[in-house]
Amino acid sequence: MMQHVATVAFEGIEARAVDVQVQVVPGLPNFIIVGLPDKAVSEARERVRAALTASGLALPARRIIVNLAPADLPKEGSHYDLPIALGLMATIGAIPHDALAGFTVLGELGLDGSLAPVAGVLPAAIGANTRDEGLICPAVCGSEAAWASPDIQIIAAQSLIQIANHFKGTQVLSRPQPKVQTRENSLLDLKDIKGQESAKRALEIAAAGGHHLLMMGSPGSGKSMLAARLPSILPSLSPAELLEVSMIASVAGEIRDGALTARRPFRAPHHSASMAALTGGGLRARPGEISLAHQGVLFLDELPEFDPRVLDSLRAPLENGEVAVSRANHRVTYPARFMLVAAMNPCRCGHAFEPGFSCKRGRIDRCTSDYQTRISGPLMDRIDLRIEVPPVTAADLILPPPSEGSAEVAARVAVARDIQTARYAATGLPGTHTNASAPASVLETVAQPDAQGLALLKDAAETMRLSARGYHRILRVARTLADLDRAERIGRLHLAEALSYRALADEVRNAA
């Protein structure tokens, strides 16, 4: 007799159905797992054997064959332990034969029969709900699975014995409830930063329109402090965004105790990060930092210190909002629509912008050119806002804290984002919520300047030699500035300010 148990295999954030077929036949005692299992799946034999023994069950002295169908799909991870164990229990009569019908099962087993948390429970639960199936998972992951649907049946147990008792009717496992991380009051606030009013203005524009931002300044000028306070002015995730972000975090094993959070991600990898760590990859094609920063912020401090090939790998995701990880045996696509916020010094010593400074490496323009040209022109062209962050003087530090903090700025950002969401929903783009992600074809309608602004834009396009991408990005920034002012049309002042954030790029290009 053969027992069927449903589970899943992950391709990106998609959970593909897998049929675990367990058969016990006469023959020499043996335990075989087939169907392209990786090392973790192959080692499930010993975990299942020990867990069943600890639960008071013994494997029959027969030939046990476990087939993971479809056989040509690679099977990775430890979540196959529980479906294999429950399939064996149903085969030997420890639980009713039809008890597992209509359930998707995943979980890792301990040697004592306990269930350990696994990655990917949320996309597995969503996939099970679309197939009108319930879910059996570890108790720690139950709250995470409950977010898939209020109607899905979930059995979240702490051990194999609890599952067996539940099916026998001697113990009833209640359905877990969705859990939200308690939002701690952040100590990071824009009130902490004295001076740097122009940088705060650029930070507000970036948050309002989802624009990419580059800050260049001397060491200690406050670039990292500004970036760290960006999440405090960003709006919370919408329900659809929350589900998408949480699915990526679930596949990556980033969700703790099954609790989700509505706070936007903020990822700050070290400049020694490899290409696989940033864009995703490895043996199991895991999501990288840019996918974990989806709908949030990716902060790259000391930007020129990153490997140039790693930085150039961001060019396609910055345009498309997704990243494709290709390997010899499979290809996975992850969402990657993030705000890039970068910080850098003007030169190796970091003091090139300070008046009267004499560089020991030679001419200052040569020193800045060698350092800044580590960033390629195509990548620089994709950054909307480029600002210089001057050093903070002692006079600034003596001043009292500013009256306006993150709460006031966040209110203006929320209003601007609501305007953008309503605008693009009216134009038939309900999935577009920011000016930065709007298609170029729509900008001709929603970002049309007035007569004076159009004349200024034409002159600037010729003088600054703007590329087509740079032209559209200036329009996007100007549209955000108009939204912050609650203006219907883009005016000359909006375009002038948007163009000013492009001036630093020309300086860098001329230095090169």
Image: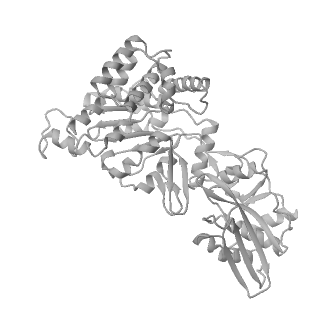
Percent coordinates x, y for residue 385 in the rendering: 37, 31
Q: Residue at x 43, y 47 (%)?
A: 268
User: Which quadrant holds residue 203?
Assistant: top left
Q: Can residue 57 be seen in this view?
A: no
Percent coordinates x, y for residue 281 in the rendering: 49, 57
Decide if residue 325 is on the left or right side of residue 96.
left
Depth check: 20 or 392 in front? 20
User: Which quadrant holds residue 241?
Assistant: top right
Q: Residue at x 19, y 38 (%)?
A: 352
**Model colouring:** one colour
State whether residue 450 is above or below residue 371: above
Percent coordinates x, y for residue 210 in the rendering: 47, 33
State whether residue 49 is above or below residue 202: below
For the C terminus, which image quadrant? top left
State whether residue 176 is above or below residue 356: below
Depth check: 303 or 4 in front? 4
User: Which quadrant holds residue 369?
Assistant: top left
For the N terminus, which image quadrant? bottom right
Q: Residue extending furthest top? A: 451
